[in-house]
Structure formats: C-alpha cells, structure tokens
Image (cartoon, rainbow, N blue to C red):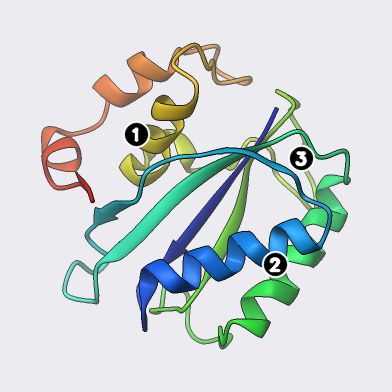
Amino acid sequence: MVYIGIGSNLGNRVINIEQAKYFLSLNGINIIKSSNFYESLSWPDPNKPKFINIIIQSNTKISPKNLLTIFESIEKKLGRKKDFKNSPRTCDIDLICYNQKILYGDITIPHKRMHKRNFVLLPLYELDKEWVHPKSNDSIGKLIFSLPIKDITSIKQI
C-alpha cells in the first residue's frame, strides 16, 4: 500500500484537501481509503494558522519519483508558493510510505519525520491499525504512544 499525506493551513483548508484528492485521482492515483480530517497546531510555530491533515491509502503503481512530480504540480495548481521552510501553505502533499520500501537519496521513504508527527500517525492508524514502520519495525500503536502527551492531546478529529 501507498500512504500519502495531504495538509493545508491557508484558505478553505477542507476544500483545498478535497481538490488535492480530486487532482490526485485525475493523475491516476486511485484512492482506496481516506482518513477523517485532523486539525493540529502548526509546526514548528504553533502561532501560525492550524493545519488540517488527512492520510489517503492508494494502490498506485506510479513510481515514488513520478509521484513527487505530480504532488508538486498539484500543490502549485492549488496556489502553493515556494516560501521559507515550514511557512503556511494552501496545500502540502507528502509521500509517507510506499509499499513498505526503504529508499534513500533524492527521495527518502518512509518519510523521515513521519514517526514523530501526530498528524501523520493518528490518521494512518485510522486507516491501518496493523501498519508497521518499515525501517524501525515499530507498530503504529507503539509510535503513537511514543509521542509526547501534548502531541496526542493537541490534535483533534473534525
């Protein structure tokens, strides 16, 4: 399975995410399941607008490199500007995990910070309670419980 994260903290966040899903499907990325929406504080600066995030599950055969090209094109189409790192954005699409593969180089899979992010782990758990991190072999439950308590209590499903 392929897991893709979509987030937004500018404009109509829910519509931005729904449009990103639509454009993903137009590009041949079949969405099998989509998590609920989760609202969380902006990172690393919680004073920035809150994010809404989801995880989608796909069985796409498109290569990771081609997926990233598609993601960047959709982000641009939805108004994302290349600004400073972690700046607010209309759309952010990340490849979280690709068929349990481990890749380094131009693309790092699984996403290198996914195991520390509540907005990835909680919606991923919703989609696949048996998911195991391909690199650490930690279960999704263990990863969630290793988060700081404030990360678990500050996120909410909407």
Residue 100: x %, y % from top left: 70, 23
Give the mark toward the camera: 3 or 2: 2
Q: Which residue is mark 2?
A: 23
Residue plotted at (51% across, 72% down): 91
- The percent position of residue 88, horizontal first and vertical second, equals 38, 79
Label 2 – label 1 distance at C-alpha: 24 Å
Q: Amino acid at mark 1?
A: Leu
Residue drawn at 82 percent across, 61 percent down = 27
Most foreground residue, 61 or 66: 61
Q: Which numbered dot is residue 68?
A: none
Q: Nearer the viewer, residue 136 or 120?
A: 120
Q: Quadrant of residue 134?
A: top right
Query: In the image, what residue type sits under mark 3?
Result: Tyr
Q: Earlier in the sequence, mark 2 or mark 1?
A: 2
Packing grade of label 2 (10 A; few <14, some 14-19, many >=20) is some
Q: Quadrant of residue 68?
A: bottom right
On the image, numbered disc 1 is attached to which residue? 122
Q: Nearer the viewer, mark 2 or mark 1?
A: 2
